[in-house]
Image: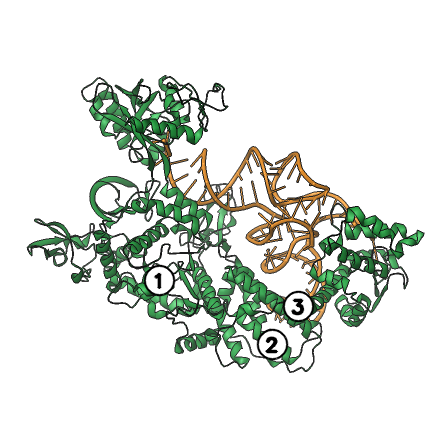
Amino acid sequence: MIDYDPATIETKWQSAWNDVKAFESEVDPSRPKFYCLEMFPYPSGKMHMGHVRNYSIGDSMARFRRLAGYNVLYPMGYDSFGMPAENAARKIGGHPHDVTWSNIESIRSDLTRMGFSYDWRRELATSDSAYYRWNQWIFLKFHEMGLVERRTAPTNWCDSCDTVLANEQVKNNRCWRCNGEVRQKHFPSWYLKMTTYADQLLDDLEHIGFPENVKAMQRNWIGRSHGAEIHFPIVDSADSIKAFTTRPDSIFGVTFVTLAPEHPLCNTLVEGTEFEADFRELADECAKISEFDRMNMLRDKKGVFLGRYATNPLTGEAVPIYAGNFVVASYGTGAVMAVPGHDQRDHDFAKKYDIPISQVLSEEDGKEPKVTGRAFEGLGWMVNSKRPDFDGLYGDDAKAAVIAALEKEGMGAGTIQYRLKDWLLSRQRFWGTPIPFIHCDDCGVIPVPESDLPVELPLDVVFTEGQSGNPLASHDGFVNTTCPNCNLAAKRETDTMDTFYDSSWYFLRFADALNQSAPFDKSNADYWLEGGVDLYIGGIEHAVMHLLYARFFTKALRDAGLNDVSEPFSRLVCQGMVNAPTPFCKTCNVEYHVDLDGQKCPICDESLGSRSAKMSKSLGNTVSPETMIGKYGADTVRLFILFGANPEAGMDWSDSAIDSNYRQMKAIHSALIQGIDNSSESGIMDEWLLARVRLVRNNWVDRMSNVGLRDGVMISHFEMVADWQWAQRRGGISASTAREYLTTWIPMLYPATPHLAEEMWEMLGMDTMLALSNLDLHDASGVDIQDTIVLGQEEYLRRVIERARSVRELAERHTDGDLSAIIIQTAQEWKVELASKAIQMHNDAFDFKQGGNKFLQTQECFQDEDMKGDVMQYWRSIVVGQKKRRGRIHTWGEKESTLVSSEFDEVGFILENIPFIATVLDIETVEVYRAGEGEDVAGKARTSLPLEPGIAWR
RNA sequence: GCAGGGGUUCCCGAGUGGUCAAAGGGGGCGGACUCAAGAUCCGCUGUCAAGCGCUUCGCAGGUUCGAAUCCUGCCCCCUGCACCA
């Protein structure tokens, strides 16, 4: 017997695939396309388990689709601009370019060793000028379209990263990358006007296959809210306060107005008055304190009266103006109309400062609002309106009426607010795409002409530790240039682009990666991206940033005329994390480094337990893919990854589990060898095994088509081995059946474990490699009636054996000495007859409640007075059932019904299989007869049902 | 607080009204093989019991002839956003 030797066959097939260029694909409108893409890696060093998982999923799907006849685009690249490379370069004194390229080499070799089937011709790296020149080209295009804006505004500045950040990159006022605190800084910056697309980005979410949580996060992020902007004229002033509200229907309950302390009107109003001092104190407090303190402080709502009043535009009432620490300057208009009767926050504030509370919405139509001591925030019926024609209106009608009145009187308008901001694109860092603009004293900020692209990053820059600032800014050769307009000396822009820019269109570049005259050819992009990338796989951490930017880009590029695609990704799968055991203290709820395994908790001194935690360097619970591939081979690692959990679920690394997957691979290998070597001429299990494979293959295609890889692999790598082994145990199969089975089975092994499959395919004598094969999977012929019977019979046998086992222990207790015989009593003929009739009637929608008893009375078996009771009881059990179990005619599946109706000869079938039953049950004698035709051992005759014989031991 | 996702047997994890004491894997136990270990194979793994038994799918109710599955309320966990007006 040949041993399973993954190392040899894996390298063999990897180079064979490479030799025949198996995975290179071209546009071919005559075939259905499938674009399979994984979020490309940031080349930070070696490949880790998260990558392995991501790409194992993608590769299996790509291979599955190729096998099914699709024209598959499956490319790979590197998201290689970014700070880690720059920081590494500073540390070791090199250039980010060199750091990046050596990491890319390393990752590429890991990817190759896993056998991933990429079209390597399309490989790209975003830090390559062949790529980023198109970043610049697109930027100029966006500029022409009016989507680029340079403006000075407060920005999020991260001190430790030495750069500004986009809104999306700030989490809890901390930097997404380094977790350092972010502060506000006024800065001239480049923006992409993503808000132009806010509505499309939100509305189009409805039609794409993203997971619900990702859609929710994006909706949340875009944060569209419908409402009104309402003007509150300031008493004795020409100014008015513009407040945004989502609840214009509560306007008659406004008892004060609150401004953000940063609101410019605050200053105007208090300057030189007795209220100035208090206001300054509040404003300073808000400006200074750290985010952490502010979160605490904000539990305590604070405000100061500004000494002035504003007029409610619909009533003319004057209400006091406050500045409040809880009003956010950057959202809406930075001013809030306060309705303490219907907003809990305003309610708290009003109580604290003794401001009147007025209720103008009622929970019940026609009734006065209840006084509860809390604000009623739901929709309600308007009451107490200080103008006619409003009372009695509800919800949207109420809002519309108020807005209409405001618009008519020029005091406001219905508006829509977004949380989404424009994308702050510029970074004060070196390792990114230079923004292609030039600052000229005379001509201003002007674009680099297209013919001068790319603006390349200089390679002669020295990076040293402790260096701060952007090295581009001090690189004379880069900075100094001439103005394309007036030809006088000018300076280059030294800001570079956010690296998320690079990854916002790489999936389009892959469609035509070698194009040197354009970012991509339109027809190529339209072919491969029609309906979007068909399957996009990556981590949930990109739910907002990358996926939102990429959607925006695709739409903007569409509007630039570069493609006809509106949504880049038609189906997104976010793969779960790979976890591994790590020491854990239950009491302190802290995870520790694996070095502390088996020791005591450093905090509370209790013994540490273990729990599953995300693999990370800081916990030391990582597992090196390289080591695992070396030990078990790529196929086993892939099988483990796919079988360990469904793609979306988190999975736990387990040494024993990968070991058992390796054993499974060996079992598959030896089953295949056994099949190939089979020279038997007859096989009693032929019919059954072939029926099984017809059934199972359809299920497999079904599961795989829906990225149900775990289920798919369970069928191909577990159930089918079990079927094979069962067939062997039950008496074996013939050579021709073995061949037929393998011809179907081996391709099913191919997506998950392609090397083994390819090797076995060749050994089976096939000339065309699986990598080049195109099998019509959907042509699977399915199971026919004969298959159903054969499968049903075998299941019947298994069930009989199972039941025999389950009563065995009891029988042993009730019998003196060893058991020597098993007695099987199949159901009486009249039972089978009745059941068969009942099935027929059930199919004809017979009403058993109505006519069941009447029918029974016409039956021959019912005429015998002694049997009447039994017949009644039996009848109930097959057509009605008990509390817990429904009647058999309802619970029998197709197989069972077919067997019963076709008068399956249970006695004959068991007689044929006596040797097998005797062997597996380890018993000398197996007796079988129809109940009533032999001794009624242990009173089992009465309990026998069709397909459920009474089983007794002796 | 809002939004999304969850809570299933020793563990992980399938399971969307009856075929469910609930797939599969891990772990554990037992057996075969072996001098032994490992590997491999077979069986068992809620509970009492020669049963159309009893109890179990976060908790409490409800709908139903029948609920892990549907409805209501509550508790807990994870993720994201957050005094967003």
In the rendering, what colour is chain A?
green
Q: What amino acid is at disc 3?
A: Asp
* Residue drawn at the location 22% of the way across and 17% of the way down: A274
Q: Please give the name of the residue rendered at 23% of the width and 61% of the height, measured from the top-left corner.
A: A133
Q: Chain of mark 1?
A: A
Tell me where residue A933 appears, x and y as whole percent.
90, 64
**How would you rate the neighbour count of disc 1 (Cα within 10 Å): few for under 14, some for 14-19, many for 20 or more?**
some
Q: Is residue A586 above or below residue B1?
A: below
Answer yes or no: is residue A94 visible.
Answer: no
**Residue type marked 2:** Glu
Of mark 2 and mark 1, the one earlier in the sequence is 1
The chain painted orange is: B
Q: Are marks 3 and 2 in contact (CB under 8 Å)?
A: no
| Image disc number at residue A740 | 2
Q: Residues within 10 Å of mark 2 (few under 14, many from 20)?
A: some
Q: How many marks?
A: 3
Query: What is the chain letter for disc 3?
Result: A
Real-space Cα separation, disc 2 to disc 1, in angstroms: 41 Å
Q: Quadrant of the C terminus of chain A?
A: bottom right
State the residue position of label 3.
A784
Considering the numbered disc 2 on the image, is that residue within a helix, a strand or a loop? helix
Tell whether label 1 touches label 2 (CB within 8 Å): no
The mark that comes first in sequence, 3 or 2, is: 2
